[in-house]
Image: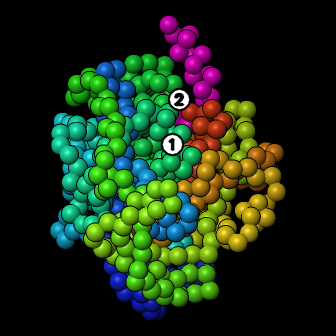
Amino acid sequence: MGKLARLAFDGYLKYHTYQLELTSGMPATFTGGFVHGPGHHIAAVAAFAFDHNLTPHPILKSGDTRLSRFERGQPYVLDGFVAGRMDKEGADSSKIALAELAEEVGGQVVGNTFRKLGELTPTMPFESTEADHYYLAAVEIVGRPSGDGGLMEVADLIAPRFLAPLEAWRAMDQGEVSEGGRTRALFGRGFDALGYLPQLGVYIHDHPQLAARYDPLGAGPVQDLRPQLKAGRIPEVQPPGTSLQARINHVVTGPREVHPLSETSRMVDSECRHAVGKNGEVTVLEGRFLSQYLQLDYDRAKLADYYLDPEHGPMISLQTEARPALAFSPGSPEVLRLDVQDLPLFRNREPREQLPPGVRPLGRPTGASPGQSDLYYHFYVRQIDPPESSGFVTLGQAIKLCRSGHGDAHTEALCARLALDLNWIPNLNMSVEAAQQLLRASR
């Protein structure tokens, strides 16, 4: 039984405090708070363009501007995935996703390629009720992005960005993409639904020996979209514009209010203006817009123990954990979820001082949801000896669980990063080397 205690901040974003009593599964009483935007949830599209070989290239959007990121010393402008808030009355998640394709990259869906990818997926479930609806689409760029008409999205900044499959993985894992963990989860589902294996550069549809072993891991039915597509050239990335709007890389704030929530959190409520910084000088642009975000004193670390089984490959530990804020989330995502460890990392101390010995990082931290918070997720793993206890599943099973109501987007991203690090293909439950040998043997 859960009840909201107080509306501690009431703006475009809202912050509620709550009390939740769990009477079964993990009996306990939880108190805390959560932030959310209009509609709570996000609709996002794994948009793909296809080259002359019909190789799928993820399409990102340039021009994602975030005050929360800038005030942590990170880039004000990054590339991000195509997505929109569920804040339009009467529009479901699919309509939101389709509208964002046109607004953010000037794209339209090719043929009958638009489909859902897995279940509702939380983004930062300790601090927010927000979750993602993920979709797949083959996309043709037919016009110029317009943005949503607000001052925060600048038409001269927004453009489609096309990345080759493995280059996309690298950019997402190295912090070059806004919300890189969620983007990794989104496009991982997209590739799996297409039956395309980036580590091998092949479609399973062309290789029966791979298709016989293939599991889409909860991304839905595998469909070969190539009969609906036309081979072509991936558009060249356009050079940066020369207008001030096209060179935005800075933001100036004021007036500004900070609303304390707890010892470790507060809401920032600021008027903002885009700006261009160069050689120590800042040129402020016309137009003011509002930016609000949850400011925290800590980040979070996803930490997974794993061991290498000679028959099943990487085995990862999942335990039942409570995510109490999800009790207040539309769509009723499960509060008790199988997950890896999710630990706070206070920013005034080095992460390694706060983590168990023997851990190693996987890639760089990434913003959890910079439109509503300055929280970053860090990714760590620890290899252990084969345990006697239960609670371990294959890497593929862990990903499938994340897509069907367990973990969250950053747990799924951790599994994907670990698979790439270990040269493992979870869909085949075999190593890259073994899969390559299987391909060679069939020629």
Residue shown at the point (53%, 87%) measured from the top left: 261
Residue 140, quarter of the rendered image = top left
Check disc 2 and report its element: helix, strand or loop: loop
Picture coordinates of residue 251, whole percent (x, y): 42, 67
Q: Is residue 208 left or right of residue 312?
A: left
Q: Which residue is mark 1?
A: 171
User: Is residue 374 on the magenta stretch?
Assistant: no
Q: Splitting the image into 4 quarters, where does residue 282 fall? A: bottom left
For residue 145, say whether it is visible: yes
Where residue 361 sits in the image (x, y, percent)? 69, 50
Q: Which one is nearer the viewer's eye here, 238 or 31?
A: 238
Toward which corner of the image does residue 84 lie, by quadrant?
bottom left
Question: Which residue is the extreme one toward the top?
Answer: 443
Density class for disc 1 (Cα within 10 Å; few <14, some 14-19, many ≥20) is some
Name the residue: 47% across, 30% down: 197
Q: Secondary structure at mark 1?
A: helix
Chain part drawn in magenta: 426-443
